[in-house]
Image (cartoon, grey):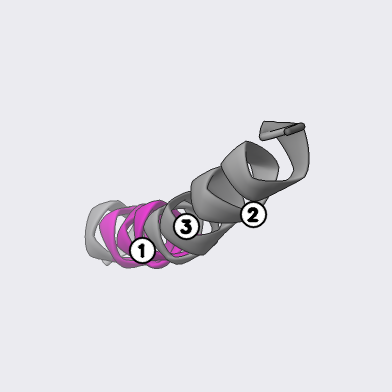
Amino acid sequence: MNRKPLLILMWAWVGIPFAYGVYELFLKVTQLFKG
């Protein structure tokens, strides 16, 4: 049984929302410093 596609899917399921959250945080921080 090949688990690699499942592993990739699980990483994407966790990683994509996490990356989006980091991106949103980055935007807010840059706005904060720009004033």
Q: Nearer the viewer, mark 3 or mark 2?
A: 2
Mark 1 or 2, closer to the camera? 2
What secondary structure is found at the residue carrying circle 1? helix
Residue 23's tag is 3
Q: Name the image quarter holding residue 18.
A: bottom left
Task: Name the foreground residue: 24 vs 13.
Answer: 13
In the image, what residue occupies the spot 67% across and 42% down?
A: 8
**Compared to 23, does 5 lie above or below?**
above
- Residue 21's tag is 1
Q: How would you rate the neighbour count of disc 2 (Cα within 10 Å): few for under 14, some for 14-19, many for 20 or more?
A: few
Q: Which mark is residue 9?
A: 2
Say whether marks 1 and 3 touch (CB < 8 Å): yes
Above or below, comparing residue 22 to residue 4 in the picture: below
Three-letter code for the amino acid on which mark 1 is drawn: Gly
The quarter of the displayed image where residue 2 is located: top right
SS state under label 3? helix
Taking the image as shown, residue 6 lies to the left or right of residue 5, namely left
Question: The residue under label 3 is which amino acid type?
Answer: Tyr
Q: Which residues are magenta?
A: 20-31
- Where is residue 22? Give x, y as percent: 37, 52
Q: Mark 3 packing: few (<14 Cα in 10 Å), some, or many (20+)?
A: few
Q: CA distance from mark 3 to mark 2?
A: 21 Å
By secondary structure, the bulk of the magenta-drawn segment is best described as: helix
x, y (%) of residue 9?
Answer: 64, 54
Q: Does 9 sit above or below residue 17?
A: above
Mark on residue 2? Answer: none
Q: In which quadrant of the rendered image does the N terminus lie?
A: top right
Mark 3 or 2, nearer chain start:
2
Residue 35 rendering spot, x and y as whole percentages:
26, 67
Instruction: Give the x, y percent position of residue 16.
Output: 54, 59
Q: Disc 1 or 2, which lies upstream in sequence?
A: 2
Q: Is residue 6 left or right of residue 18?
A: right
